[in-house]
Image (spheres, coloured by chain):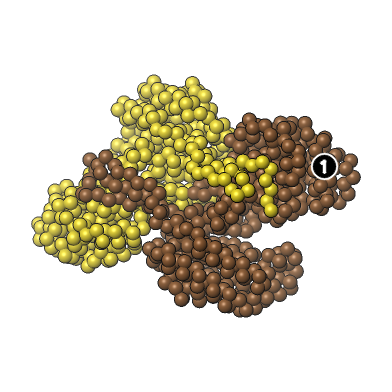
Chain colours: A yellow, B brown
Amino acid sequence: MNMSDTGLQKHVLDRVCLAKEASRFLAGISTQDKNEALQRMAQALWDNRQQILDANRVDIEDAEKSGDPASRIDRLLLDTQRVEAMMKGLYQIMELPDPIGETLETAVLQNELRVEKRRVPLGVIAMIYESRPNVTVDAVGLTLKTGNAVVLRGGKESLRSNQALVDALQLGLRKSRVPVDSIQFVNRVDREAVDILIQARGLVDLAIPRGGAGLIGRVIQGACVPVIETGVGNCHIYVDADADLAKALSIILNAKTQRPSVCNAAETLLVHEAVADEWLPVAISNLLQHDVEIRGCPQTEALARQSGAPNRLVRAASEEDWATEFLAPILAIKVVKSADEAIRHITHYGTQHSEAIVTENVAVAEDFLSRVDAAVVYHNASTRFTDGFEFGFGAEIGISTQKLHARGPMGLRELTSYQYVVRGNGQVRQ
Amino acid sequence: MNMSDTGLQKHVLDRVCLAKEASRFLAGISTQDKNEALQRMAQALWDNRQQILDANRVDIEDAEKSGDPASRIDRLLLDTQRVEAMMKGLYQIMELPDPIGETLETAVLQNELRVEKRRVPLGVIAMIYESRPNVTVDAVGLTLKTGNAVVLRGGKESLRSNQALVDALQLGLRKSRVPVDSIQFVNRVDREAVDILIQARGLVDLAIPRGGAGLIGRVIQGACVPVIETGVGNCHIYVDADADLAKALSIILNAKTQRPSVCNAAETLLVHEAVADEWLPVAISNLLQHDVEIRGCPQTEALARQSGAPNRLVRAASEEDWATEFLAPILAIKVVKSADEAIRHITHYGTQHSEAIVTENVAVAEDFLSRVDAAVVYHNASTRFTDGFEFGFGAEIGISTQKLHARGPMGLRELTSYQYVVRGNGQVRQ
């Protein structure tokens, strides 16, 4: 390791160690003190909004010089309204009940040992993310409310914005009883900083990657600390032979077009052959009105062309299309012979995120719901509801697509662990 | 990759894929069918005990030839009684309630979506373990009861015993409705087989290493599938100024001597200076009667020598001793100035497994219980109770020392995940 590597290692590990130290203090802090800290941080964001917007302008100018696409620049952009939204987010987290200290279970064993299972913080959470600066504020609010310290490592494109946000949040913390070291920011853009963070076994209790498949894959491959895999959603809507076709139409339009760039948007539509000839042309012409590109199986492609779809919006689906999370107004469509074929297609190509069936046949629906292996399975509803706020958690730090610890939308409780507290009067084991 | 690597990769991945396929079927199987399978497997173990003992004899002979220590050979040894114990273990798992399908929570959202949080299997669990062949049977029983498929990778020293056990269990499964592919056995001893298993992202839902620190570290460093870290226990007993000294004596004797080779045995005794002169000589002479070697701080060492301890059983503790899980009749002892110093010592050297305080002072006890970061914290009881059976889980697949997903003893529930099932009538997101 050369000198600069050593310097980087020290920079990152110093931050992790400070977070660990702060986390020991945070675990015992009262709800009132945590809420006061949230309030102080919200106020500090607002008071320092000019510095934040100035820093953001430099990030935006750099992104424009690099020729970043408009969608990416929009994700990066902050304005007064967005700073206000971040501030309000912290106030919302303040209002949520504090999960820490909750007694989850109690038992008195035969030997009279009293066992209490108590909810406690995880400790130190490393957030590794890209692009949107609001993740910085969300992550700080959610981890602090749950008594965790956080080490933030945002994308290099938002480095100055994130630094300004962290500066403001730390100014707020200084006016509270929560240690300022509870928020640590890795301000080095080297990719190796991520590697050091996710190798810090015994110091980082959880790493959460949020961003594209590349970032997530890199964290999962390189980590030796526990990780929660988030986000990739190749979601399907299956329209059954017994579907209410009006419901099916509004569900696929919502799931595909309401916000195509998010992980709970639909990417593939599967249609039972019994309703394909009647319904697909209607569905396709509605999708085309929203400028959705169709990548279809042969039957779909033929139906689309008969509907008079322009060439630029229709093509044959490739094998790769079935496996792709487009995050764009593109929809793969396949006609299937049965619900069973739909389930097998989803099993093969899905990412265990959100999957829906549209049918009035309850038996078929229940079979789908019990056999499809995804974080959230839907009967007659849009996949777009997979979201911590929609689920009533009042917050969301990400959507887990793994099965260990948390699955689907993650709110406050998913940022906690538990501990057994055992009280005795001298018991020893026989 | 050379030809033999390719062959190994195929061997391991074929087994993982078969397990994945079986897991899809297993997730929907009834409790009755799973219990029948457990019963058939138990019977098959008994019916095939001669083949199992014959295979074990070959493993034992090899171990003896290699000059393995007696303790290791004892762990490896099977006899009729131990086979009977394994059989009874399966019957016990049969009697336990089936956690799968349980509704954990329900909610009706404002838009009338009905959300059910339902307990489901994890999918495919990879067990990577050493030495004791009974882990093979325990792991199969617990994973099958929870609707998971299992891929077993035992140690090379027990290869033939494990193969014979798996053969018998699969014979049992063939007489049941559970697919025989639910149990997969990696019978290649190459260390690379473990690497392939823990890199099988998307196929293995959880890897559980059970064994020495070397095995566990290797799995954690190399895995890109979710892992639960188990087992290393550098456990402390802190005897406070306000301790009931009779309780303290029976607790340290139990925690150190009842079974020194297990992870919940005590490795370090911390004693408040206010009671050290009075109590430590008594404690030390009792420990010496059990042939426990003392590695002490200067004050402890002096007191031990004054108690007439033989030289072979007393020495000064090194820095390394405070951090060592001896798993043997050796105890590190340190006199501390305060409960706070004890907590700081535990924070520095502990492994977040099991930690105990002995005191009649409730305030000091509660402070200890809330500040010590370990899976199980005890007041006036032996650390030896950290165990799935003692906790009333009716089973145990290991003891987690991480905070993600499961902490402390892991029973059936800790081998499950959950899924959100959402039922609507055409809802779309606004």
Residue A252 visible here: yes
Q: Quadrant of residue A308?
A: bottom left
Camera-side residue of A65 and B133: B133
| Residue A38 coordinates in the image, percent (x, y) | 43, 27
| Residue shown at 42% from the left, 39% from the top | A412
Residue A204 visible here: no
In the visual, does B252 lie left or right of B147? right
| Residue A194 coordinates in the image, percent (x, y) | 49, 44
In the visual, does B124 lie left or right of B215? left
Q: Is residue B188 above or below residue A110?
A: below
| Residue shown at 42% from the left, 57% from the top | B100
Q: Residues within 10 Å of mark 1 (few under 14, many from 20)?
A: some
Q: Name the residue beneath numbered marker 1.
A: B282
Host chain of mark 1: B
| Residue B69 coordinates in the image, percent (x, y) | 75, 65
Q: Quadrant of residue B252?
A: top right
